[in-house]
Image (cartoon, rainbow, N blue to C red):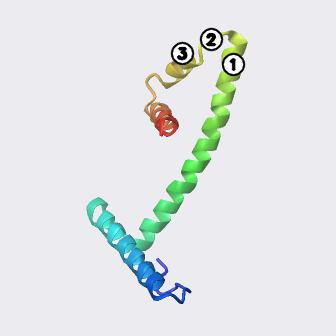
Amino acid sequence: MRLGKSQSQDFDAQIADTTICLMQYNILSLAKRLLDYESMGELFRQAGTETLELTVVEKIWGYLLELIALIADIFEIDMEEILNKIADGNQSITKIIKMKAALNAA
């Protein structure tokens, strides 16, 4: 969390840096206590992995949507209809579709 790594010579900036560091620690320790009993290092690794995974999933999802849109244009079918048929009964794809819709709404 880089406690003590502030290179600022302003006292207020150093106090702010220390305060932010301690707030991060409190949030992560609360998450650790509520979710499971993993080490702090594991929480950081997991957060980094999920962030990387999300960006890869977003890129793949973008390519898939472009492909589905192209297929929908070729066969003159509504893209939403194709997505609904693909997602029907598949929880993973339904979750991705809902996540993408939430990201687009935000």
Instruction: Say which residue label 1 marks.
Output: 71
Residue 29's place in the image compared with 3, above or below, is above
Decide which of tag 1 and tag 3 comes sooner along the chain: 1
Instruction: Say which residue label 3 marks.
Output: 81
Q: Please, which residue is most extreme toward the top here?
A: 76
Tag 2: residue type?
A: Ile
The reply to whether callout 2 and callout 1 are in contact (CB within 8 Å) is yes
Question: Image quarter for residue 38?
Answer: bottom left
Mark 1 surroundings: few (<14), some (14-19) or many (≥20) residues within 10 A: some
Question: Circle 3 sits in a helix, a strand or a loop, which is it?
Answer: helix
Tag 3: residue type?
A: Glu
Measured in 3D between alpha carbons, the distance from the residue under mark 2 to the one under mark 3, in whole angstroms, is 7 Å
Question: Looking at the rendered structure, which numbered label has been put on residue 77?
Answer: 2
On the question of residue 95 being in view, the answer is yes
Q: Position of residue 84 (x, y in %)?
A: 50, 20
The reply to whether callout 2 and callout 3 are in contact (CB within 8 Å) is yes
Question: Circle 2 sits in a helix, a strand or a loop, which is it?
Answer: loop
Decide which of tag 2 and tag 1 comes sooner along the chain: 1
Q: Position of residue 32 (x, y in %)?
A: 32, 66
